[in-house]
Image (cartoon, rainbow, N blue to C red):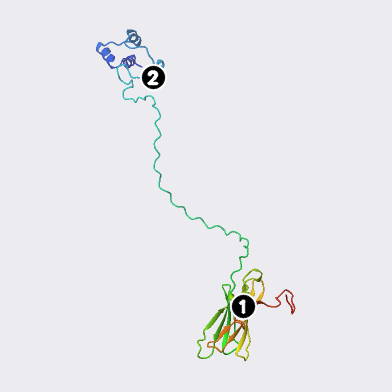
């Protein structure tokens, strides 16, 4: 390297001007001895010395060259950004295979029993017996000319000893037994079988002396005839018998 150029860089712009005006070319040792600049080399400088400002007030950086200063402290973390929009719903997956059949559930409670029966043993009237809502109704319809031929109902559930639960059970089916006889009073029997298998019976008579014909289920004193548990009940393996 040219000693003049090196010396000029060490002295700075004012010193270079003085040497050029005097026309003096000196060696590096002479400049050092004259006390113009101190004997400093890059290896002798500490990091703080290398980045400190020059004696003439400049920042000590070479012309047209960037100069890196000391690293500053880490800044605080910035706030979180806004939440982005939700993504699109994915496509529906394929239907899975049918699972195995489950076990059969327990038998549910017995539903309400309903039933109906009819009989016509006379040209004058016909009989019905209907079971609905736990109650038993007997009906009669006058078939004679000039009558309205509408069914007239009597609630037999209100009569004494009607099977209404417990050991007797509840009525679950009904039937009518009517007999065509010549006398004016026509005797009719109404039967029900209960949920416990018992058979109960109520007796009535049909009167055709009235218009229209009517049912009468009272005894001679005018009191309602009770339901009776028929003598001998159906039993397993019975043969012309019963319990």
Which of these two is toward me, 154 or 29? Answer: 154
Residue 28: mark in rendering: none
- Residue farthest left in this picture: 21
Q: Nearer the viewer, residue 55 or 11?
A: 55
Other-residue count near label 1 (Cα within 10 Å), few / some / many at <14 / 14–19 / ≥20: many
Determine contact: label 1, label 2, CB under 8 Å: no
In front: mark 1 or mark 2? Answer: 1
Q: Quadrant of the N terminus?
A: top left
Residue 47: image location, x then y, percent? 40, 20
Determine the residue positioned at 57% across, 83% down.
215
Q: What SS does tag 1 mark?
A: strand
Residue that badge 1 annotates: 174
Residue 160 sits above or below residue 119 on the image: above
Rounded to the nearest angstrom, the CA distance separating label 1 from label 2 is: 117 Å
The residue at the point 53 percent across, 82 percent down is: 152
Tag 2 residue: 48
Q: Is residue 145 left or right of residue 197?
A: left
Residue at 66% x, 77% y is 228
- Could you say which quadrant of the image residue 138 lies in? bottom right
Q: Is residue 232 above or below residue 81?
A: below
Q: Position of residue 20 (x, y in %)?
A: 26, 13
- Total label count? 2
The secondary structure type at the circle numbered 2 is helix
Q: Residue at x 40, y 17 (%)?
A: 46
Residue 237, image x, y percentages: 74, 75
Q: Earlier in the sequence, mark 1 or mark 2?
A: 2
- Percent position of residue 117, x then y: 60, 80
Query: Splitting the image into 4 quarters, where does residue 185 fall?
Result: bottom right
Quadrant for the C terminus in the image: bottom right
Q: Residues within 10 Å of mark 2 (few under 14, many from 20)?
A: few
């Amino acid at each position: 390297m040219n000693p003049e150029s090196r010396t000029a860089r060490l002295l700075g712009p004012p010193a270079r001007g003085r040497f050029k005006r005097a026309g003096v070319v000196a060696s590096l040792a002479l400049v050092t001895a004259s006390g113009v600049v101190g004997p400093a080399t890059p290896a002798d400088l500490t990091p703080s010395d290398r980045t400190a400002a020059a004696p003439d007030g400049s920042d000590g950086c070479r012309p047209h060259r960037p100069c890196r200063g000391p690293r500053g402290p880490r800044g605080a973390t910035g706030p979180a950004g806004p939440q982005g929009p939700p993504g699109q719903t994915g496509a529906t997956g394929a239907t899975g295979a049918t699972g195995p059949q489950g076990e059969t559930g327990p038998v549910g409670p017995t539903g309400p029993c309903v039933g109906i029966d009819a009989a016509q043993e006379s040209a004058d009237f016909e009989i019905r017996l209907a079971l609905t809502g736990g109650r038993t109704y007997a009906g009669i319809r006058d078939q004679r000319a000039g009558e309205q031929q509408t069914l007239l109902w009597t609630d037999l559930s209100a009569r004494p000893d009607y099977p209404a639960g417990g050991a007797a059970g509840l009525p679950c089916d009904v039937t009518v037994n009517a007999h065509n006889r010549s006398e004016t009073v026509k005797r009719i029997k109404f039967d029900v079988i209960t949920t416990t298998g018992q058979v109960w019976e109520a007796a009535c008579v049909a009167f055709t002396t009235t218009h229209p014909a009517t049912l009468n289920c009272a005894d001679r004193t005018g009191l309602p005839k009770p339901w009776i548990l028929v003598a001998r009940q159906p039993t397993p393996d019975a043969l012309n018998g019963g319990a």
